[in-house]
Image (cartoon, rainbow, N blue to C red):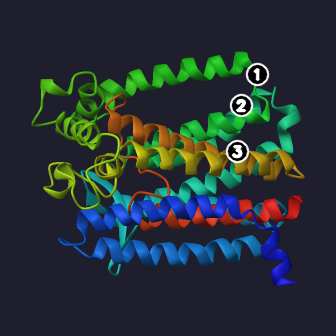
Amino acid sequence: MIWYFLKKIDWVMVISAFLLTAMGLLSIFSTSFVQDKTFFIKQAIFIVAGFFLILVFSFLDYRFFRNHSLLLLAIYILSVLMLVAVLFVGKITHGALSWIKIGSFNFEPVEFAKFAMILILAQYFSLRHIELYRLTHIIISGLYTGVVTLLVFFQPDFGSAMVLIFLWIGVMIIAGIKLRQLLLLLLLGIIIFSVSWFAALKPYQKQRITSFINPYLDPKGSGYHRIQSMIAIGSGGFWGRGLGQGTQSQLNFLPEQHTDFIFASIAEEWGFVGIFFVFVFYFLFFWRIIKTALAAPNNFARLFCVGFSVVLIFHIVVNIGMNLGILPIAGISLPFVSYGGSNLLINFLMLGIVQSIAVRGK
């Protein structure tokens, strides 16, 4: 029975994810093993734990979430409580209260909040997609999203706040929001951003947003990360400098080379060939998710796949964009590649639910 179940898992999707984690792990080994082995060891532990999460949630019938609205509400409330808690007992990292320290590990509640919001939005719109023309449903779903987004913004974590907003909009587009309503939301978003720029954003956040236009205006300050990232990518050439041979990453000119700027680190040491394989693995991964969503037997399953995809795509586009110097630095990780247990384990958990959908959709 177990063997029959395992054969129905979409192994192309799973293997693509693990190949991405393998590339990330090799990059972490190359850039940090000599200086600090804990990054590599912890990431390896996270990957092994993630494999078991995939198996557990693949065996768990995803309809358990769909059929128990109170459970989803409890998960949502728990995510809100954790986001409130991090504001009081959180660990400050890079100017943001985003982490709760548990022993030798740090947990980032916003990653769990993303999972909670995907479940809530998938459940809400799966029951009301026919009535989406009613403004009430947009407002209610917006309140769910707004509470979590504001708590994340107060940390402050502008990048993750934007992820949640794009998740909400992306799910609504697939659920069937009208163009007029979408344009109204975009106008409202522009107004809110304009107000936030003058009333809420801190100076360093404004510098991150403006420095991508011309990083050389402040090459040793707000533009430093972007300049070093572009130098690293450009120096990789076609074949790369070789594992452990990147000057920008090995000599620590490139900051955060195992997290936010791991794409630049891979580009420097693996070159165009390495980046090509990164895109190939992402393409295979999303191709299989789209196939799973199209074959899903109900709207909840379909919207869950969509929500998961929107979050990952936003992360990928913003992370690679800020590495290339064409988007502001937003502290967004590269899914399955960047170092970090919270993001990696939650992604594996959601991948397990997608596998549950794939198995039961066949």
User: What residue lies at 34% left-to-right and 26% top-to-bottom?
Assistant: 197
Q: Is residue 81 left or right of residue 125?
A: left
Q: Which residue is mark 1?
A: 178
Please state which of the two labelled residues, at mark 3 or mark 1, is closer to the viewer: 3
Q: Is residue 82 visible?
A: no
Quadrant of res 339 = bottom left
User: Residue 58 appears in which quarter of the rendering?
Assistant: bottom right
In the image, 10 versus 360, the foreground residue is 10
Name the residue located 21 percent from the left edge and 57 percent from the top edge: 245
Image quarter of the N terminus: bottom right
Mark 2 and mark 3: Cα distance apart in space? 10 Å
Where disc 1 sits, the SS reads: loop
According to the picture, the residue beneath numbered tag 2 turns out to be: 173
Earlier sequence position, callout 2 versus callout 3: 2
Query: What's the residue type where badge 3 is placed?
Result: Val
Q: Is residue 278 above or below residue 69?
A: above
Residue 326 appears left or right of 73? left
Tags 2 and 3 in contact by the CB under 8 Å rule? no
- Which numbered circle lies on residue 78? none
Q: How many marks?
A: 3
Distance in Å between CA atoms under marks 2 and 1: 8 Å
Give the x, y percent position of residue 173.
Answer: 71, 31
Residue that badge 3 annotates: 306
Tell me where residue 353 appears, x and y as whole percent. 71, 63
> Residue most toward the front?
239
Amino acid found under the numbered disc labelled 2 = Ile
Q: Work out whether residue 20 or residue 339 is closer to the camera in this orientation and state it.
A: 20
Q: Residue at x 31, y 24 (%)?
A: 198
Percent position of residue 167, x then y: 60, 41
